[in-house]
Image (tube, rainbow, N blue to C red):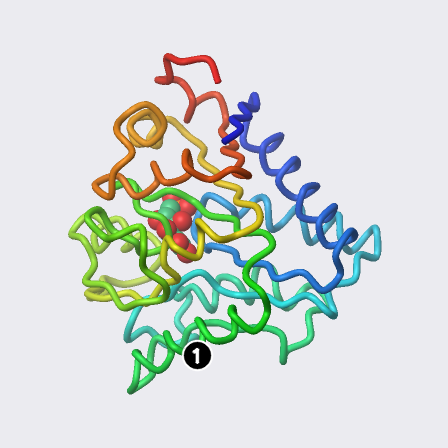
Amino acid sequence: MKLLVFPDNRTLSQNAADEIIRLVRAKPTAVLCFASGDTPRLCYQLLVEKATTANVDFSAITFIGLDEWVGIPPSNEGSCHYFLDNLLLKHLNFSSSNIHLFDGLSANLGQECKKMDQLLEEKGGIDLMLVGVGMNGHIGFNEPGISFNNYSHVVELDNITASVGQKYFKEATSLKQGITLGLKHLSEAAKVLVLANGLKKAPVIKNALEGDISDKMPASIVRTHPNSEVMLDEEAASLLIKQY
Ligand code: F6R
């Protein structure tokens, strides 16, 4: 694991966007798997600006959405689908047939998971996974206590996730389950970028990087990955003691 601390979220986001562009240029058929949420918002905006200016070609890239709220339609602004589409996917020249997002409305969620796992197997896994960290240490919807050995699965959401998740929705929304890639996908990804910014993430980042490596703190898995980068702004890094 490599730790990179940036003075602010803009610098962090610029560096993450540059890293994505480097990968897409080096491997135009790469498989990208990205989170939604507030953390990568600026990174995606900058990625769109930079990639558009530099004519970066995403037409042969496979894009995988990390997770989705079960029961929430893509038309809902709080859905991961809506977020990714509006901030990122529709602004770059992805081929629609190469975009794979979980259907949180599926009558057969188990089948949704199987489809995603099969696709990733066929594609040879994820080249670059970009994730945020939840206030309870989750990655995707891999909540505290979920095994590091899972592939895609349906999760009962933690109370913290259900209440923090309200920030994405215009009205109070019942959030009970999520569908998500598993931490085994993260372990097997060629490269992982974990982003965190702001003071509110400082305690969870300290726990993930300096506490035990345990399924109680899913984000701690990043320390076991040989090619992971944790990109923090100074606020999110402010409680760290160790020098990395
Ligand atoms: C969203 C996701 C979640 C978020 C996490 C942090 O697709 O996978 O794990 O990354 O909850 O959310 P924000 O970035 O809003 O603080």
Q: In the image, what residue occupies the spot 59% across and 69% down?
A: 123
Label 1 CA crowd tier, 10 Å (few <14, some 14–19, many 20+): some
Give 77 or 29, whichever is nearer the viewer: 29
Residue 21 percent location from the top left of the image: 72, 48
Residue 48 percent location from the top left of the image: 69, 54
Answer with left or right where residue 116 lies relative to residue 219.
right
State the residue lying farthest toward the right: 54
Q: In the image, what residue occupies the spot 55% across and 67% down?
A: 85
Q: In the image, what residue occupies the spot 28% across and 28% down?
A: 207
SS label for mark 1? helix
Residue 236 percent location from the top left of the image: 41, 26
Q: To which residue does mark 1 refer?
A: 115
Answer with left or right where residue 36 lies relative to residue 6.
left
Answer with left or right where residue 93 lies relative to residue 167.
right
Residue type pointed to by label 1: Lys
Give 204 or 147, whichever is nearer the viewer: 147
Q: Residue 87: which quarter of the image? A: bottom right
Residue 77 percent location from the top left of the image: 42, 66
Q: Residue 237: which quarter of the image? A: top left
Q: In the image, what residue occupies the spot 44% across and 60% down?
A: 66
Answer with left or right where residue 232 lies relative to residue 111.
right
State the residue lying farthest toward the bottom: 107
The relative height of residue 109 versus residue 159 in the rendered view (above or below) is: below
Q: Is mark 1 within 8 Å of ligand 1?
A: no
The relative height of residue 141 versus residue 192 in the rendered view (above or below) is: below
The relative height of residue 13 versus residue 40 in the rendered view (above or below) is: above
